[in-house]
Amino acid sequence: GYTNGASDNATGVAAALATAARLRSVPGLAVEVVLTSAEEAGMIGARAYYERHRAGWQPDQTLIVNFDTLGAGRLTVVEQTGTLEVIHYDNPATQLARSLVDTDAFRHRAQLGRWHTADFDSVWFVRGGFNTLALCALDADGRMPRIHQPADTLAAVDMTPLQTAVDLAEAVVRRWAV
């Protein structure tokens, strides 16, 4: 069915573009923004991109940041996803984000969490052993408000988790790139 998609996932697109703009000034860092489709149909767009490009990447020199549904709730560093298959986000990028969540800059703005309803486009990169950070916003009950519902409109978007995601992603990438 039709949904508006403001939080899921116009907020992810906005966060990706804003983060990339901030990272343009990092010397020696190549930034690529990839916006895929067909997540709900099995992460088909992300898988096609991954399969086409993975041979050219070096896992220790590649970092993926997945922004998904950042329009309501609290920014969450995803540590685990999946329903039938559990995917663990336990790599240097996620570890950096975990350490930043414990700092004064993010302690009251972000949290660690799990998403059990499905996976994110980043699942292919995690399975492939790449440094992968997945960020979303979850409410107090661990849910993504209004996703896949007609109420997912721009007027209902809270920009706070989106802005926090950009700040956190930038901090992770800058520390990782050193």
Image (spheres, rainbow, N blue to C red):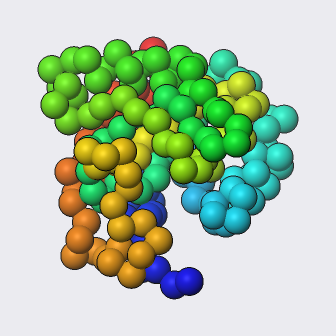
Image position, residue 54 (x, y; %): 79, 38
Q: Residue furthest bottom?
A: 2
Residue 5 placement, left or right of 126: left
Quarter containing the N terminus: bottom right
* Whole-percent x, y for residue 80 in the image: 54, 32
Above or below, 130 against 31 in this view is: above
Q: Quadrant of residue 111?
A: top left
Picture residue at 66% right of the left edge, 18% below the top: 60
Q: Is residue 1 above or below residue 148?
A: below
Q: Position of residue 56 (x, y in %)?
A: 80, 35
- Which image quarter holds the C terminus? top left
Question: Can residue 125 be seen from the camera position used here?
Answer: no
Name the residue: 20% across, 51% down: 160
Nearest the camera: 73 or 142?
142
Residue 64, compared with residue 2, is above or below; it is above
Q: Is residue 96 visible?
A: yes
x and y, in percent, of residue 31 in the image: 53, 41
Q: In the image, what residue occupies the spot 20% across and 25% down?
A: 107
Report the front residue among 36 and 117.
Answer: 117
Q: Is residue 59 left or right of residue 164?
A: right
Q: Quadrant of residue 171?
A: top left
Q: Residue at x 31, y 46 (%)?
A: 141
Left or right: 14 in relation to 102: right
Residue 22 position by quadrant = top left
How many labels, in total?
0
